[in-house]
Amino acid sequence: MVRHTVGCDHWETKQELALLESIYDDTAKTPYQRVLERKDISLDAKAGLMNLYVQLNPVELRHRIDQKTAKLWKISR
């Protein structure tokens, strides 16, 4: 992600360092975290999202995505 944002160059000066640090000053939040912070989202909607969130398994999601991607490549040839 860093290379995507600022490229692959080498940054060496104090001015460049200050600019890079200012880019990363902001605390990153997922869309899920942002929704939970909003006051205009109902508690019921947030509870539903929380229920879904605790059931997520990143390893299983990655496995399913890999399987579907492989199938996509197979049928496209």
Image (tube, helix red, strand yellow):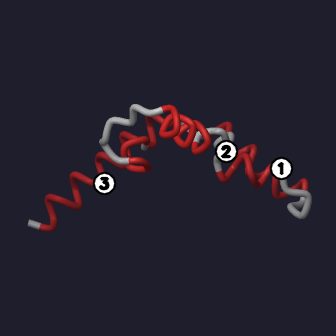
Q: Residues within 10 Å of mark 3 (few under 14, many from 20)?
A: few
Residue 50 coordinates in the image, percent (x, y): 75, 44
The numbered mark at residue 37 is: 1
Q: Nearer the viewer, residue 18 or 76?
A: 18
Residue 33 coordinates in the image, percent (x, y): 73, 46
Q: CA distance from mark 1 to mark 3?
A: 33 Å
Q: CA distance from mark 1 to mark 2?
A: 10 Å
Secondary structure at numbered mark 2? loop
The numbered mark at residue 5 is: none
Q: Is residue 70 left or right of residue 44?
A: left
Whichever of labels 3 and 2 marks the residue nearer the N terminus, that label is 2
Residue drawn at x 65%, y 39% is 25
Q: Are marks 1 and 2 in contact (CB under 8 Å)?
A: yes
Q: Amino acid at mark 1?
A: Glu
Residue drawn at x 36%, y 49% is 65
Q: Is residue 4 above or below residue 73?
A: above
The residue where tag 3 is placed is 68
The residue where tag 2 is placed is 29
Secondary structure at numbered mark 1? helix
Q: Nearer the viewer, residue 4 or 53?
A: 4
Q: Amino acid at mark 3?
A: Lys
